[in-house]
Image (spheres, grey):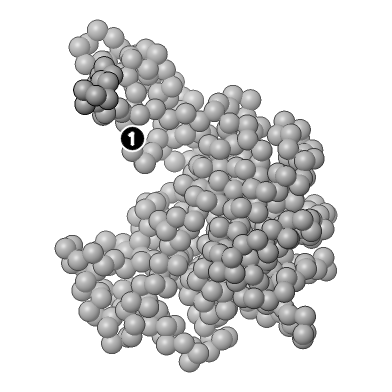
Amino acid sequence: MTNDTYTLTNADGSKSMQLPVRQGTLGPDVLDISGLNRDLGVFTYDPGFVATGSCDSEITFIDGDKGVLLYRGYPVEQLAKHSSFIEVAYLLLYGDLPTAVELETFSSSIRRHTMLNEGMLRFFTGFRYDAHPMAMLSAVVGSMSAYYHDTMDINDPHAREVFTHRILAKLPTIAAAAYKLNAGQPFIYPRNDLGYCDNLLHMLFAVPAEEYEIDPVAAEAFDLLFILHADHEQNCSTSTVRMAGSSGANPYSAIAAGIAALWGPAHGGANEAVLAMLAEIGHTSNIKKYIDKAKDKDDPFRLMGFGHRVYKNFDPRANIIREMCHRVLKQVGRQNSPLFDLALELEEVALKDEYFIEKNLYPNVDFYSGIIYRALGIPTSMFTVMFAIGRTVGWVAHWREMIGNPHGKIARPRQLYVGPGLRDYTPIEKR
């Protein structure tokens, strides 16, 4: 909080109030408008909350104009280069990078919480064989409250800690079970001797009939993607988790709500849209035609995976993931799919086109993540599930921060009512 204030006066000049200015560690100042209705009898109007701070947070900072993303103050570029997803998870949850002992203790705990209750496994036999994995993920995560009663007391610090480790450990197991159902293959149990990403690969692609050898490049790609997707400030799904959790709902319900929000094509489904766009373009010979369509304001076609609502310059995650994308494509062999050639040529053309340069429409993290997942054998329907695995730690960190805030309130946005005025009831025979 600073000593600065803004003076606001109502329309007829009969009332005025001082709006205190709150100042964060980084980023623009914010006006504290919490007393606006009390003092002036008005609300603010901000559809989509594009200029509204709903909370204060110590977790993640974004500067969209400069292309900056910090986790607990650490640039994501440094974490992606030097850290691991489990270490980043610890950082987001507890505020500091762990010591070697702390990291081993945390990692060991996650490895030993990966098993699902057998009753939960039987849920999967009740889904259709072609059920969307996100539908299964949100349903099964929500059902965890029926199995793990020891973590339902949100006011118990120990229960919150057990929940934290449990949800991070079990989400890959649930995701892999959903994949196996779609693939018509038997469920593969987790292995406590494997690391987080190695274990996920094992559960996704191993079969009982033969040995499965984990591809280290695939594991490294997963780890990097999970780091880059781990948190992104008050995005739609994170805000949903906070809003659901603000009612005092059990934490599994709050995370299930976040998964449902992530499923939307404007949020977590963006990398699926990239693959659909590439399929529509079809061939490298059609790139110029579609580039021209994207420039035409009257044409509904849009280049998916380019530009970002928050990042007005470039998405810092895209620069990191681009190198991994090219490594993965080199590993699997670009000749395996003409789609990869198409994607890389589209990237090259867009990066050199003056129209896209002028408007800062650079490839974002969704453009590359979809291509990587496709190259590693992940079906399009699983893309958002993979996103959820990485983002869960951010959701949990924000939920913990919100629950631990002694001044927290239930989320209750207001509205601008534009419906009918007061009307009297008319009996049905007179309508």
Q: Residue at x 65, y 61 (%)?
A: 126
Q: Indicate whether 211 appears above or below 71.
A: below
Would residue 415 be found to the left or right of residue 108 on screen? left
Determine if residue 355 is in view: no
Q: Which residue lies furthest to the bottom in this view?
A: 335
Would residue 145 be found to the left or right of residue 8 on screen? right
Q: In the rendered image, which residue does mark 1 sit on? A: 46
Whole-percent x, y for residue 306 in the image:
36, 65
Whole-percent x, y for residue 35 in the image:
42, 17
Whole-percent x, y for residue 371 in the image:
48, 75
Determine if residue 326 is in view: yes
**Dot 1 amino acid type:** Asp
Q: Is mark 1 on a helix, strand or loop?
A: loop
The residue nearer to you, when weighing 297 against 327, is 297
Quadrant of residue 358 within the rendered picture: bottom left
Q: Which residue lies furthest to the front in this view?
A: 429
Would residue 209 be found to the left or right of residue 345 on screen? right
Q: Residue at x 73, y 80 (%)?
A: 207
Quadrant of residue 123 within the rendered picture: bottom right
Q: Residue at x 56, y 57 (%)?
A: 135
Q: Indicate whether 14 appears above or below 6.
A: above
> Which image quarter holds the C terminus?
top left
The residue nearer to you, when weighing 100 against 135, is 135
Whole-percent x, y for residue 372 in the image:
52, 75
Q: Indicate whether 332 appears above or below 200.
A: below
Mark 1 crowdedness (10 Å alpha carbons): few <14, some 14-19, many ≥20: few
